[in-house]
Amino acid sequence: MMDISFSEQSRLSDIIIDYSILDNDIGFGVNNITGDPQFVDNIDLLLSPTSPGIDAGHPNELYLDADGTRNDIGAYGGPGAMIN
């Protein structure tokens, strides 16, 4: 997981966090999931088949997984992603 911090110079209006799995509700962004992403391991960060991030990414056809399904949230979702 990645930590996000803000400095005094940060402007919240410049940050967009959508279609993400977060530890805590950050109070902004849309279509985010709060909870455990259920990674297979903490090295590759692949999602397990029971992860809430499976088929939970942006629904636009531009972002579909290589197999034609809605993309997954995370590094391995969307066009060009490897099918596991």
Image: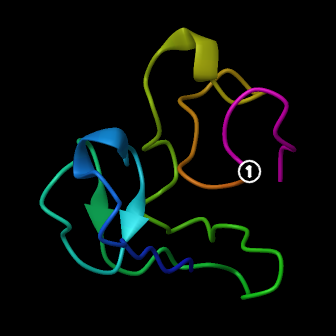
Which residue occupies the foreground of this view, 70 or 32?
32
66 sits left or right of 15 in the view: right
Is residue 63 shown left or right of residue 19?
A: right
Task: Name which quarter of the figure residue 81 lies in.
Answer: top right
Which residue occupies 43% across, 23% down? 59
* Vertical side of 77 occupied by 23: above or below: below
Q: Outermost residue, bottom direction?
A: 42
Q: Which residue is drawn at 62% across and 78% down?
A: 39
Q: Is residue 84 left or right of residue 16?
A: right
Q: Within 10 angstroms of label 1, few (less than 14), some, or many (20 or more) residues?
A: some
Which picture quadrant has residue 36? Answer: bottom left
User: How many numbered marks appear?
Assistant: 1
Residue at 83% from the left image edge and 44% from the top image edge: 83
For the residue marked with disc 1, what is the amino acid?
Tyr
Left or right, residue 79 beside residue 33 = right
**x, y percentage for residue 13?**
24, 41
Residue 42, x across and y down, in percent: 72, 88
Residue at the image position 62 percent from the left and 23 percent from the top: 64
Mark 1, secondary structure of its residue:
loop
- The residue wearing badge 1 is 76
Q: Where is residue 3 in the image (x, y as percent from the top left)?
A: 49, 80
Q: Is residue 79 magenta?
A: yes
Residue sitting nearer the eye, 32 or 12: 12
Q: Is residue 40 above or below residue 34?
A: below
Residue farthest to the front, as pictured: 9
Image quarter in which the N terminus is found: bottom right
- The stretch in magenta equals 76-84
